[in-house]
């Protein structure tokens, strides 16, 4: 496993704002019920900003009052997921990307510290936008997309 550098939030990719504008319904993979965990903080923030968020964690039934699902493929049909946010180790990303491709999502967002170039290439080949090694909450707060922040 390759170590990755923490991102420089002053040098965001130009297309990142367009990606953020397109996000409406999120599957958050690796959601945690523990308030000190980044995945819990991001889930809480996204819900507070008005995003529809579906927590995914096979070890949980509910997080922040939201039913939790064991996988992306287990999400109900009414969950019109356009984005998958990943809080898992890089070596666990490929199966999540495969599920996201099967689900027909538009964006895969690997959180800060998560880089899997093979999974990113697979997603891009399927026509999916990919963001790696950036925190969705931090980027959203910086860009204040759609006045939601």
Image (cartoon, grey):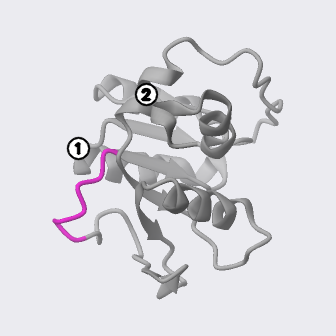
Question: Where is mark 2, residue-wise?
Answer: 19
Q: In this view, does 17 lie above or below 104?
A: above
Q: Is residue 123 above or below residue 53?
A: above
Seen from the viewer's position, the closer of residues 27 and 70 is 27
Q: Is residue 77 magenta?
A: yes
Category of crowding for the residue at label 2, using alpha-carbon neighbours closer than 10 angstroms: few (below 14), some (14–19), many (at least 20): some
From the viewer's perspective, tell me whether residue 78 is left or right of residue 119.
Answer: left
Measured as percent of width and height from the top left, residue 110 is found at 58, 42
Q: Is mark 1 on a helix, strand or loop?
A: loop
From the viewer's perspective, tell me whether residue 61 is left or right of residue 32.
Answer: left
Q: Is residue 104 above or below residue 7?
A: below
- Label 1 – label 2 distance at C-alpha: 16 Å
Q: Which residue is drawn at 59% across and 37% down?
A: 140
Q: Residue at x 48, y 79 (%)?
A: 58
From the viewer's perspective, tell me whether residue 19 is left or right of residue 144.
Answer: left
Is residue 64 at all visible to an observer of this figure?
A: yes
Q: Residue 104 carries which label?
A: 1
Picture quarter with the C terminus:
top right
Residue 127 in which image quadrant: top left
Measured as percent of width and height from the top left, residue 120 is found at 49, 31
Seen from the viewer's position, the closer of residues 47 and 34 is 47
Picture quarter with the N terminus:
top right
Q: What element carries label 2?
A: helix
Q: Number of numbered discs present?
A: 2
Q: Residue at x 66, y 18 (%)?
A: 12
Which portion, as a residue range, is magenta?
76-82
Q: Main secondary structure of the magenta part?
A: loop
Residue 144 in which image quadrant: top right
Q: Residue at x 57, y 54 (%)?
A: 92
Cβ–Cβ under 8 Å for marks 1 and 2: no
| Precedes in sequence: disc 1 or disc 2 | 2
Task: Give the residue furthest to the front.
Answer: 147
């Amino acid at each position: 496993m390759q170590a990755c550098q923490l991102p420089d939030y002053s040098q965001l990719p130009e297309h990142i704002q367009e990606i953020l504008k397109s996000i409406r319904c999120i599957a958050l993979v690796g959601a945690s019920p523990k308030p000190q965990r980044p995945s819990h903080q991001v889930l809480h923030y996204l819900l507070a900003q008005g995003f529809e968020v579906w927590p995914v964690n096979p070890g949980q039934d509910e997080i922040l009052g939201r039913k939790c699902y064991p996988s992306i493929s287990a999400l109900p049909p009414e969950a019109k997921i356009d984005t998958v946010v990943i809080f898992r180790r890089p070596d666990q990303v490929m199966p999540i990307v495969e599920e996201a491709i099967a689900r027909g999502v538009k964006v895969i967002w690997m959180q800060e510290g998560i880089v899997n170039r093979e999974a990113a290439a697979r997603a891009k080949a399927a026509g999916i936008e990919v963001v790696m090694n950036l925190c969705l909450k931090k980027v959203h707060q910086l860009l204040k997309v759609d006045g939601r922040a």
